[in-house]
Image: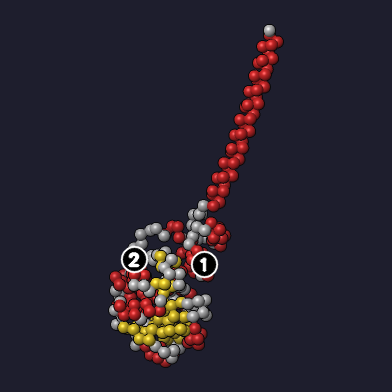
């Protein structure tokens, strides 16, 4: 009888050992799978935005399709705008306060950038102002310079005007008619100029800023609106809504004249 009991206890102990070993093995498998899943989740979620991360971050962003495609394109094309792009998840949903008071009593034209966090993430025809909004931002600089009317000519207001009045062309940018028809609706006087350097210089010396639409060349690979704000010692001074570097450079007419597609001068 005792031998039979011992055999039964031995069988039970062996069975328990197998069950315990099996449970332990299952636990290890679950742990490994859990770590792997967690790793994959962490690898595929947007990283915290850090402008110092650089190209490695944007390559991950492109793979994840987390950022708007136009901002990825902006990052690749314009080194000046990279911090703006990488700040997208931090800044895009913030309620921005747009105060142009710092420019109110200055004689110089303000330099507004498309990729300013205050308006750069706004939608503009399916893309962002940062990528496609050079037209309204250029007109904003001119209009605000001439009138100091922030309620009408702050960049966000001109962007909204362009969208509401049909000058924004989805996935294409801005219709040229914003620069004459639209500007007149906003209270500006507009003159179409011929491509003659002396006439352009004359208008600038009268205090009439000029907007140019540029074709492919030193400013763009497709089309781009820039502002001529002054003429000084044989050089044109510009405000490029997409570049601080190009705005700080002085330009000879011969450097860009063959890329000009149309010219508008403004006054009030």
**Frontmost residue, 157 versus 19:** 19
Quadrant where the C terminus sits is bottom left
Most extreme residue toward the right is 3
Look at discs 2 and 1 and give the one toward the viewer. Answer: 1
Quadrant where the N terminus sits is top right
- The image position of residue 81, as x and y in percent, is 48, 67
- Res 73 label: 1
Is 194 placed above or below 123 here? below
Distance of mark 2 from mark 1, alpha carbons? 26 Å
- Res 98 label: 2
User: Which quadrant of the view contains residue 76?
Assistant: bottom right
**Frontmost residue, 33 versus 106:** 33
| Residue at 41% across, 65% down | 123
**Frontmost residue, 123 versus 249:** 123
- Res 51 label: none
| Residue at 66% across, 15% down | 8
Is residue 268 rendered to the left or right of residue 119? left
| Residue at 37% across, 77% down | 178
- The image position of residue 255, as x and y in percent, is 51, 85
Q: Mark 2 touching mark 1, by CB under 8 A?
A: no
- The image position of residue 168, as x and y in percent, is 39, 72
Question: Is residue 245 visible to the viewer in this orientation of the structure?
Answer: yes
Is residue 40 rendered to the left or right of residue 85? right
How would you rate the neighbour count of disc 1 (Cα within 10 Å): few for under 14, some for 14-19, many for 20 or more? few
Question: Is residue 145 visible to the viewer in this orientation of the structure?
Answer: no
SS label for mark 1: helix
SS label for mark 2: loop
Is 40 placed above or below 143 here? above
Most extreme residue toward the top is 1
| Residue at 50% across, 76% down | 222
- The image position of residue 13, as x and y in percent, is 65, 20
């Amino acid at each position: 009888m005792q031998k039979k009991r011992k055999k039964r206890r031995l069988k039970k102990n062996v069975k328990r050992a197998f069950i315990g070993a099996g449970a332990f093995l299952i636990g290890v498998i679950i742990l490994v799978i859990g770590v792997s899943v967690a790793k994959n989740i962490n690898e595929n979620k947007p990283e915290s935005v850090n402008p110092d991360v650089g190209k490695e971050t944007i390559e991950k962003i492109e793979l994840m399709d987390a950022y708007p495609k136009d901002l990825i394109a902006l990052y690749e094309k314009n080194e000046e705008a990279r911090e703006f792009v990488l700040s997208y998840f931090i800044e895009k949903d913030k309620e921005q306060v747009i105060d142009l008071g710092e420019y109110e009593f200055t004689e110089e034209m303000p330099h507004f950038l498309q990729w300013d966090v205050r308006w750069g993430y706004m939608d503009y025809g399916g893309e962002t102002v940062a990528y496609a909004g050079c037209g309204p931002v250029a007109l904003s600089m001119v209009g605000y310079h001439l009138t100091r009317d922030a309620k009408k000519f702050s960049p966000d207001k001109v962007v909204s005007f362009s969208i509401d009045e049909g000058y924004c062309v989805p996935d294409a940018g801005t219709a040229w008619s914003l620069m004459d028809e639209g500007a007149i609706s906003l209270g500006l006087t507009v003159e179409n100029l011929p491509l003659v350097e002396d006439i352009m210089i004359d208008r600038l010396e009268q205090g009439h800023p000029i907007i140019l639409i540029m074709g492919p060349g030193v400013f763009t690979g497709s089309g781009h609106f820039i502002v001529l704000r002054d003429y000084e010692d044989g050089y044109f001074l510009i405000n490029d809504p997409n570049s601080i570097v190009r705005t700080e450079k002085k330009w000879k007419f011969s450097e860009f004249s063959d890329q000009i597609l149309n010219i508008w001068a403004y006054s009030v």
